[in-house]
Image (cartoon, rainbow, N blue to C red):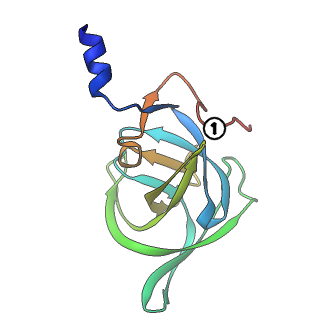
Amino acid sequence: MTELAIKEIKQPSLKTIGWREWVSFPELGIKQVKAKVDTGARTSALHAFRVTEFNHHGTSWVEFDLHPFQYDNETKITAKAEVVDVRNVTDSGGHTEQRYVISTIIELGEDQFPIEVTLTDRDSMRFRMLLGRTAMHGRYLVQPDKSFLLSENTE
């Protein structure tokens, strides 16, 4: 048996995704948002503004607004989710910010799975969602020269 064949047997079968993919969050009412696949980011981040914490039956929840499409600050979705944590997150510029963390279901192509995402204002960023390596671990390989391998490009 060749060395390549041995490696293929030992490695699980992972789907390949591009450096950007369309994702949705059905529990949040978000039908489509373009995500940048970021293997340099440990956690995933979702664009959110006007984040308001409230108590719901004794647990901490947040309500937030988001603009799901880049370059479109008119389309707005309001979502609510239970807070699972509040974490200090350091961005790529070295700035640390305290962020709410929520857990929800993400859809990527035909795949659905739970994901933790931090909420942060990404209005000035090109992508309204970053898909971090924790969410991809054990599921996907990234092909950095391709886009929309599991999701349809709707631009």
Q: Residue at x 47, y 46 (%)?
A: 131
Q: Observer-nearest residue: 54 or 8?
A: 8
The C terminus: image quadrant: top right
Residue 148: x and y, percent?
Answer: 61, 32
Please give the count of numbered marks on the rendered protein.
1
Q: Secondary structure at mark 1?
A: loop
Residue 42: x and y, percent?
Answer: 34, 48
Q: Observer-nearest residue: 131 or 112?
A: 112
Report the residue that reaches farthest toward the top: 2
Rendered view: 153 above or below 108: above
Q: Observer-nearest residue: 97 or 144?
A: 144
Residue 51: x and y, percent?
Answer: 53, 73
Q: Residue at x 27, y 20 (%)?
A: 7
Rendered view: 89 above or below 151: below
Q: Residue at x 38, y 38 (%)?
A: 39
Q: Is residue 57 left or right of residue 96?
A: right
Rendered view: 123 above or below 51: above
The residue pinned by badge 1 equals 151
Q: Which corner quadrant of the image does residue 90 belong to?
A: bottom left
Q: Amino acid at mark 1?
A: Ser
Q: Is residue 128 left or right of residue 152?
A: left
The N terminus: image quadrant: top left
Residue 55: x and y, percent?
Answer: 48, 89
Q: Residues within 10 Å of mark 1 (few under 14, many from 20)?
A: some
Report the residue that reaches farthest toward the front: 1
Q: Residue at x 48, y 39 (%)?
A: 37
